[in-house]
Image (tube, rainbow, N blue to C red):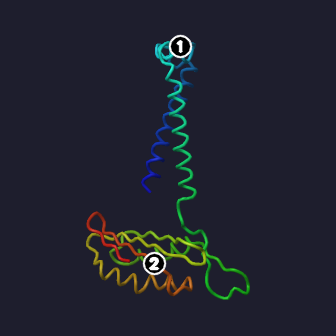
Amino acid sequence: MHADRVNRAALAILGLLLLALGVSGILLGAGVFGDHAAHRKLLDNSVSHFIGAHGGWVWPAVAVVAVVIALLSLRWLLTILFSTGRLADITVAGDHSAGRTTLTSTALGDALSGEIESYRGVHSTRTHLVGEPTNPQLAVTVNTDRNADLAALRRHIEANALPHARHALGVPDLPIRLDITVTKQRSARVT
């Protein structure tokens, strides 16, 4: 998610800036920059004099920037918490007389990824389940080597790995979206 990466980078830069300011304040107070600098007031400089004399707009601008940063941080947090429809647990079909059987979605995803990654020409695989726990949908992204035979690989995945996932869930008509991407070359999307 592009917005997530941008927000994380902005917050990381802000965090590093605040950390640098804190470390420099500690070093200044400890006298590392000299005794004269350690005893100066924090806002006793030409910039603070200019702000006090001519810059009645500076502190409201600082407040607006702080509010914008706080809102961006809140947006990032809400995006992380609520943006995905991924499932944590999925309901496994079968006899439920002894209780509801659940399976973590990562278990199925890891098993399916491991199987597909064992195929020749596959570089990496990402899987995730979306939807409702009783009616999941599976999304599979396969990243292949440049010289992989896409048609043969697609047929192999559709004939072997995807039926294994459907069988494991007990859902023979489980909707699956398969995306096959060639590493830094061409890409093909198969639905």
Dot 2 amino acid type: Ile
Direction from residue 182 to residue 58 in the image, left or right: right
Q: Position of residue 169 (x, y in %)?
A: 56, 82
Question: Does 118 sit left or right of 32 as displayed?
Answer: left
Position of 148 relative to 83 (above/below): below
Q: If you read the primary sequence from the N terminus, does the residue marked by circle 2 or circle 1 appear first?
A: 1
The N terminus lies in which quarter of the figure? bottom left
Question: Label 1 amino acid?
Answer: Asp
Q: Residue 118: give its label.
A: none
Question: Going 30% across and 77% down the picture, which residue do you hit?
Answer: 150
Which residue corresponds to mark 1? 44
**Distance between mark 2 and mark 1 Cα atoms:** 65 Å
* In the rendered image, the vertical position of residue 19 relative to residue 149, given as above or below: above
- Residue wearing tag 2: 176
Frontmost residue, 177 versus 115: 177
Locate residue 165, reporting x and y percent.
Answer: 50, 81
Q: Quadrant of the C terminus?
A: bottom left
